[in-house]
Image: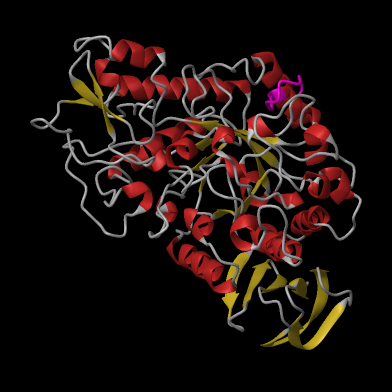
Amino acid sequence: MKSPWWKQGVIYQIYVRSFADSNGDGIGDLAGITAHLDYLKSAAPESLDVDAIWLTPFYNGPDRDFGYDVSDYRSVSPIYGSMEDFDRLLSEAHKRGIRVIIDFVPNHTSDEHPWFVESRASLNNPKRNWYIWRDGRGDGLPNNWRAASGGPAWRFDPKSGQYFYHAFFDFQPDLNWRNPEVKAAIMGDMRFWLEKGIDGFRLDLINYLLEDKDFRDNNFTAAGWYMGCFQDSQYTRDLPDTHRVIAEFRRMLGEFSDRMMVGEIVSYPWEESAAAEYTNQHELHLAFNMEMLAVVSFGSQGFRRVVERFERKCPEDGWPAYSLSNHDVPRHLGRLAGYIIYGRRADAEEKGKVLATMLLTLRGTPFMYYGEELGMTNRWFSRKDIRDPLGKKFWPLYQGRDSSRTPMLWEKGPGAGFTTGRPWLPLDPKAEHLCVAMAAARPDSLLNHYRKVIRLRRECPALAVGDFQSLNGPEEAFIYRRTFEGQQILVALNFAAKRISTNLALSGRVLHSNRRSEERISGDLALAPLEALVALEKE
């Protein structure tokens, strides 16, 4: 039986605001994405050849959290274009064989959503119970719950004398998913997009969907230093009832052909991810393993531990999903490969090739983040340039998420081909060296490495959908085997800047390497510094 597209394919995340600006206002938009679809997939050999794109939110809203504060789920914000622009993007993407996944935010709305405006209007408003309202305890808060953005998860509303709950920012009140009317309304909004023809959803903060109905205090934990929480999330995340709601989403998607859901399963750096518990034939098709994003040093063992742990926990009907970067964390070349503010280490691009090969050859669906194929990295922002509310809150100790959201680098010159106006965030200072035009012209560039490995993945079923076996080797290496219906492929990744020898005897054909040109290997396998090798052991 043929594997579904979301198992075989490579998915490319587009931060809509930063990909391509079509009207010169400095902000990326839907029409800009449409104009660059051939870069992502076309008949031309120079296309990236991805299978799907994931678009971050483009709905109407105040845009205080850049799309994740929604005031109308069935709309397109004028900032990003019109519904006609979306329809054209969807049509043109489908013509090229590109699936379209849209970001959907079911956990909370903007405080300017008409539902919340009604809810806070009075204690007896029909929509009061659409959100989570509580009285304080004595002179204090309803309980000790903390927001993921830092501080208490409760905001006082002077007009009604009650507090409302917000798992993230205080302008993003959480919906009450124990209210059947809320469930019906949100699922109706999801159905709207499914009927339009979108191919799937990325579900934001999905494991925060329901909270403890008795509002019990979370437990203190010294490990919970993140944003000053100092508590676990026992009563605010990963509740059994959340799984039941997701199962209802899955049944609805089953009414449509070939659709999928990938969920953001939030975990903190000190925790093991619960993602494997959500990916199965009854719930999410895919669930992001956030542990991969928490690896902060360039080395084989951190990644190996993450992959092997997920493989052990993943059910038979589950499927891994991996990413190295996204819009909420610093880009991986900045975290892992030694890029610095105004320059880069000489070996950073070769480290990027090792990481790219790993991402694209592990068992699971790879999610690329726009610009990672160029080597885009993070930058430091002055206080006046910060746009992210997290960055404004914690600067200079924390830059926020702006560093990973700088505009896409298309060509040399002012605006880097992203805009003819002033970009909403300053460009990467290495724009001229990293842009698509420069990278495409250099055969050994990181961009061309991504293209080669994506095509190799497409040509080899074992890399796309095969089984995974982790192999023993030197501490500096991550070595594994992928097998499918007689095809056997070895992937050997040397994370060290030195030559290493393995205890593996190999007789096979080299399919890809960034460090060697020979076509065959026979005998003991040795790896060049920072070599990413893919070899066919058995046809």
Measuring 35% from the left and 29% from the top, which residue is drawn there?
170
Q: Position of residue 474 (x, y in %)?
A: 61, 84
Judge from the rendering whether residue 173 lies leftward or rightward of residue 86; answer left or right.
Answer: left
| Residue 23 sits inside the magenta stretch | yes
Q: Position of residue 83 (x, y in %)?
A: 64, 15
Q: Position of residue 197 (x, y in %)?
A: 63, 25
Residue 538 visible (yes or no): no
Instruction: Name the main secondary structure of what is drawn in magenta.
Output: loop
Give the quadrant of residue 122.
top left
Q: Which residue is farthest left?
A: 138
Q: Position of residue 203 (x, y in %)?
A: 48, 36
- Bounds of the magenta span? 22-30
* Along the viewing direction, whichever of 43 and 409 lies nearer the viewer: 409
Residue 260 visible (yes or no): yes
| Residue 384 sits inside the magenta stretch | no
Measuring 34% from the left and 36% from the top, which residue is drawn there?
167
Judge from the rendering whether residue 178 lies leftward or rightward of residue 478; answer left or right.
Answer: left
Q: Which quadrant holds the C terminus?
A: bottom right
Which colour scheme appears in the figure? secondary structure
Q: How many marks?
A: 0
Measuring 54% from the left and 42% from the top, which residue is drawn there?
401
Q: Is residue 105 above or below residue 441?
A: above
* Along the viewing direction, whichever of 424 and 278 lies nearer the viewer: 424
* Along the viewing direction, whichever of 539 and 405 lies nearer the viewer: 405
